[in-house]
Image (cartoon, rainbow, N blue to C red):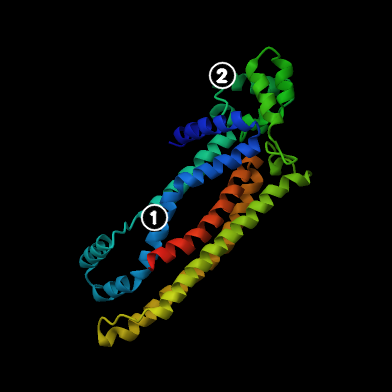
Amino acid sequence: MFNFFANIFGYILNILYTLVHNYGLTMIIFTIIIKLITLPLSIKQQKSMIKNAELQDQMKSLNFKYKNDPEKLNQEMLRIYKENNISPFSGCLMSILQIILILSVFYMVRSPLTYMEKMPGETIDTYKNQLVESGDLQEKETVTYPEISIIRNAEKVVEKNQEDENAGKIQELKNNMNFLGLDLSKIPQQNMNDYTVYIIPVLYIISTFISMRLTVKMQENMQNKKKKDTDPIIVEKEGEETQKENQEDSMEAMMQTNKMMSWMMPIISVTIAFVAPLGLALYWLVSNITMIAERVILDKFVTVEENK
């Protein structure tokens, strides 16, 4: 499945690359296009989040009322979702889509000769074997990112295959991987002494932290506004105090989880950003920046629309 989407993305990337002749600029435009394509889904998810927040009192009341009847509880919850035109699985579908996008782009950036340049696998293997046999490339360097390793040694490939058109494409691609003085074919883990390889990963980590903090802040504001503006729903007089305590405990648990995630994601990002090619880190950086802008805009306009 990831190969399928990586192939499609590769065609798009190839078209953009043909137009701008710069790998970094191509990745930026590609990221913005993907974000625009998924924008309707993001708007739908934002609306679902708002509606779900508005329905939390009803859901908690149902949990209290039918705590000994799980079947009836599920029926009533589905009824409320249906009446409010909400899919209980919308959040899961968006998460699955994001995973597919991330892994598909990873496949594509990891193997640009296969997915973007559409070179035959036999040709790529020939180049790799030539470099290994001549000692220009060690076998262990071809394990994780074989095609990136070939691009990094483009001059040697051209020298050994002077009449090969594909070899010329590799040399051109390497030249065009220079973006604002940064070589997007480099992998930070393999170039620790080059300070330039840290620029994009560090910016990516910072943007990830900002994105997570923004998400947590938006959720906290939503919960605080709801707690302030919404009168508690009393299901049974004797159960009012217990229900209020459960709501406060649930809210506190959610806020603690969000705070923990706001620290965990940047830590995970450090690992990913430093072992991946800079081209992939650039995609994630631009994706994070557009996501931050998207969340700010949607939080303002979609929320206003829903509360009119």
Direction from residue 29 to residue 69 in the image, left or right: left
User: Does residue 213 show up?
Assistant: yes
**Residue denoted by label 2:** 122
Q: Residue furthest bottom?
A: 238
Picture coordinates of residue 304, whole percent (x, y): 43, 66
Tag shown at residue 190: none
Instruction: Work out how far the residue at label 2 is from the one at label 1, CA to CA, in angstroms.
Output: 44 Å
**Residue denoted by label 1:** 44
Mark 2 crowdedness (10 Å alpha carbons): few <14, some 14-19, many ≥20: few
Direction from residue 124 to residue 53 in the image, left or right: left
Task: Work out which quarter of the rendered image holds the C terminus and state it.
Answer: bottom left
Picture coordinates of residue 163, whole percent (x, y): 68, 12
Which of marks 1 and 2 precedes in the sequence?
Answer: 1
Above or below, 160 relative to 19: above
Q: Amino acid at mark 2?
A: Glu
Picture coordinates of residue 215, whole percent (x, y): 52, 63
Tell me the SS state at disc 1.
helix
Quarter holding residue 145: top right
Q: Disc 2 or disc 1, which is closer to the eye? A: 1
Residue at figure coordinates x 48%, y 43% from the top left = 101
Residue at figure coordinates x 68%, y 36% from the top left = 185
Mark 1 crowdedness (10 Å alpha carbons): few <14, some 14-19, many ≥20: some
